[in-house]
Image: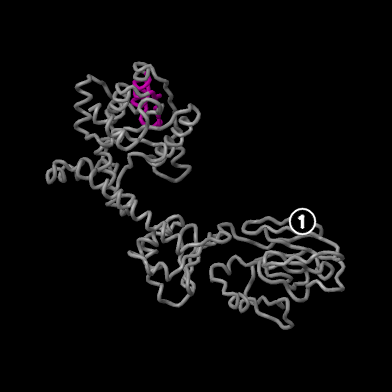
Amino acid sequence: MLDQVRQYIEEHQLFSLTEDPLLVAVSGGQDSVALADVLHRLGVQFAVAHCHFGLRGEEADADEQFVRKLAKKYEVPYFAEFFQTKAFAEQEGISTQMAARALRYEWFERLRQTQGLAYIATAHHQRDAAETMLLNLTHGTGLAGLHGIPAKNGYLVRPLLGIGKPELFDYLVEQHLLWREDASNDSPVYQRNRLRQEVLPVLREINPNLDQTLQFTAERVGGAEEIVRRYVQDTAAQAQRTEEEVTYLNIATLQRTAATTLVLHELLRPFGFSFPVVKDIVASFPAEPGRRFESPTHRLVKDREQLVITRKVLTKFGTHQIQAGQEVLKIDGLHLRLELAEAAGLTIPRGKAVAALDADLLKFPLIVRPWQEGDWFMPIGMKGKKKLSDFLIDQKVPLNLKDNVFVLVSADGKIAWVVGFRPDERFKVTEATERVLVVKRM
């Protein structure tokens, strides 16, 4: 088995057997004991990390003592951490299994960095990968879930992923190795255990080489995923642009892609949109503009020729005052810088992100607030009133970007600047202006 593991490490370029020191996660069970022994026999430099989750009382205490002695046997550094897993799970509102996973991998990475180690090695094997694939398939998954557990993921490596569970057990017996049994591995409370005890035996009657078959399938899926990733990357280069934290996707370009829904789902994955929602988005392409779709963190609006994606402002923006002499206003979603200058010799700045206003026509405190239905102003260069709602339509501002439009209002209620768009004619700088307030959106 040593040659098989060595070949797997080299074939998948997991790490250098002679140069890269590892942090090996050892629970004391069969798999991790086998991993530690194999790495020792292959001459790999490593340290042992053991997690005590505070869930199994004296049994867990005995596991920790066992792993401590194992590290001493191999004469390698030993690290143990004692977690308050239940308290963490209750605080975060997650299961104890999820809490344990989050705690251990955060600690592993801290150890890896502080101890100057190259990689974190876990004892996942062929059967673990098969179980993960089937669980993901049961819950619903994309390509990423169908390739199960990757052999290498950042600083995480799985040297035993090409080894079957029976081979690991035979190795333990041949090498006269001892291990600890975890009773929770047999509990039907956990979905993985039910799959292991009730489902997989039936599938292995159909295919005795199920674990290896699923491993080969995972490798093919992984290759297909890489092809899809590159295709999605090329599509993004053509269809996607980002300006000031707003992402735009060109609908016509998306419609020309193969498997549009799949490609769009991959593009929208970073924004938290689920596959069923993406199907609805694609179905809306022929519809009138204005359809709105939500993810937990983002809002997407189907505009005329593009999809417009913005981050939700999760803390509601209110009304804020700017006092006379105040130089900065920085709030969620908006950062303004203000400068009072003498008009004489001043070059009036241009651009949508800046407004030059006659300071003596403004009444303080100024108010910054979101625009509202019924707002009107006199766009600079015009003599008449303009409803702000009509102005935003003329500017072709997508529906969800309208939520991010703010106005700067004089204390007498007059809008002085539609921030990022147009100042008001009533506050423009003229030859009679003595002082200028320059307001810049940062």
Residue furthest to the left in view is: 205
Which corner quadrant of the image does residue 318 belong to?
A: bottom right
Q: Is residue 56 magenta?
A: yes
Residue 418 in percent (x, y) is at 68, 70
Q: Position of residue 311 (x, y in %)?
A: 53, 59
Q: Please provide percent x and percent y for residue 310.
A: 53, 62
Residue lying at 67% horizontally and 67% vertically, measured from the top left: 352
Tell me how many marks there are.
Answer: 1
Between 337 and 324, which is closer to the camera in this rendering? Answer: 337
Tell me which residue sits at (62%, 56%) in the image: 332
Who is closer to the viewer here, 375 or 151?
A: 151
Give the position of the N terminus as an image quadrant.
top left
* Residue 43 sits in quarter: top left
- How busy is the neighbourhood of tag 1: few (under 14 within 10 Å), some, or many (20 plus)? few
Specify the amino acid type for callout 1: Glu
Question: Residue furthest toward the bottom?
Answer: 384
**Residue at (61, 76) in percent of width and height:** 389
Residue shown at 29% from the left, 21% from the top: 41
SS for callout 1: loop
Is residue 319 rendered magenta in the image?
no
Location of residue 2 in the rendering, given as x and y in whole percent from the top left corner:
25, 26
Residue 200 appears left or right of 38: left
Which region is colored magenta?
A: 45-68
**Up-down: is 70 above or below 305?**
above
User: Foreground residue, 332 or 379?
Assistant: 379
| Quarter residue 387 falls in | bottom right
Residue holding disc 1? 327
